[in-house]
């Protein structure tokens, strides 16, 4: 997939031609294949954004799990952290919560942005020219590890703690991401329900912030933050346990559904 992304529009044109030539006889039923993440082995860590919806910023601030918070819940500038490449898993792969020995695994439904071309010093006005497309993701988090280690990397980076998919929808196919809508369900019960337009720092702002001194590369992934409704927002917290099923849906991209092991 990285090779296709690097080809840009030329690659998409070639793919469309190949699909047309192959015809319907080349189609496979989803039951015959195992879907992987759109970019199963990213070239570098996933870039992620903390406290990027107002209500979630407040619930996280009030939860006691944020060891980095100051006196106010809403950050003045984007909070950027990373998740290890090995955290990426497929849209229907299990969540290996047994790797979290603190038993505090939580969900975070998020919109993932995939970068399409290299750039540094990208202005907000030009940011969408660098977006290849979008995917649905779950920024699964071991909350106690996140708090214990202060910097969020370990609690966010356990193997399999970033399910993603079920597709990569190109920017042209997707349209304006402000029209996207995110929902997260746990065992069929709605936990998160928000428009993606509610981001505190929108996609152009995030791209401008990160690229100010860091070159973004084709295939880079930015997960943009989660809305209110995560497990630690409840009293007592509702952590994921073995057997739970987490479903994150972003319209118009699609759903990922992962069983907790």
Image (spheres, grey):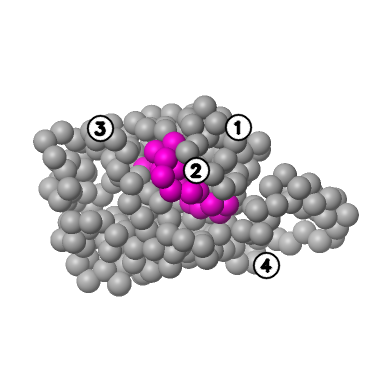
Position of the C terminus, as image quadrant, is bottom left
184 or 101: which is nearer to us? Answer: 101
Q: Which mark is residue 175?
A: 1
Closer to the chain start, of discs 3 and 1, is 3
Q: Is 203 located above or below residue 145 in the figure?
A: above
Tag 2–tag 3 contact (CB < 8 Å): no
Circle 3 SS class = loop
Circle 4 SS class = helix
Instruction: State the image quarter where residue 143 is shown.
Output: bottom left
Circle 2 SS class = loop
What's the magenta region? Answer: 206-225
Nearer to us: label 4 or label 2:
2
Alpha carbon separation for disc pair 4 and 2: 41 Å
Q: Horizontal and vertical percent for residue 168?
A: 59, 49
Q: Which residue is mark 2?
A: 120
Tag 1–tag 4 contact (CB < 8 Å): no
Q: Which residue is mark 4?
A: 32
Q: Which residue is mark 3?
A: 76
Nearer to us: label 4 or label 3:
3
The residue depicted at 66 percent of the width and 59 percent of the height is: 3
Closer to the chain start, of discs 2 and 3, is 3
Say whether residue 36 is visible: yes
């Amino acid at each position: 997939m990285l090779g296709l992304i690097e080809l840009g529009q030329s690659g998409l044109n070639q793919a469309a031609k190949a699909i047309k030539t192959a015809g319907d006889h080349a189609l496979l039923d989803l039951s015959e294949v195992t879907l992987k993440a759109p970019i199963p082995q990213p070239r570098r860590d996933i870039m992620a954004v903390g406290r990027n919806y107002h209500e979630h910023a407040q619930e996280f601030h009030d939860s006691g799990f944020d060891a980095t918070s100051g006196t106010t819940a809403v950050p003045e500038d984007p909070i950027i952290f990373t998740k290890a490449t090995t955290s990426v898993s497929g849209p229907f792969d299990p969540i290996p919560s047994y790797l979290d020995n603190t038993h505090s695994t939580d969900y975070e439904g998020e919109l993932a942005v995939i970068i399409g071309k290299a750039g540094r010093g990208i202005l907000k006005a030009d940011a969408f020219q660098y977006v290849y497309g979008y995917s649905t993701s779950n920024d699964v988090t071991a909350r106690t590890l996140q708090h214990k280690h202060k910097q969020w990397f370990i609690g966010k980076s356990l193997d399999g703690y970033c399910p993603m998919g079920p597709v990569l929808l190109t920017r042209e196919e997707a349209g304006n991401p402000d029209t996207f809508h995110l929902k997260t369900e746990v065992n069929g019960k709605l936990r998160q329900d928000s428009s993606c337009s509610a981001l505190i720092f929108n996609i152009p702002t995030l791209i401008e912030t990160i690229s100010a001194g860091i070159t973004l590369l084709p295939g880079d992934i930015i997960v943009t933050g989660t809305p209110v409704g995560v497990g630690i927002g409840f009293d007592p917290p509702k952590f994921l346990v073995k057997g739970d099923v987490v479903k994150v849906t972003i319209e118009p991209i699609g759903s990922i559904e992962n069983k907790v092991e």
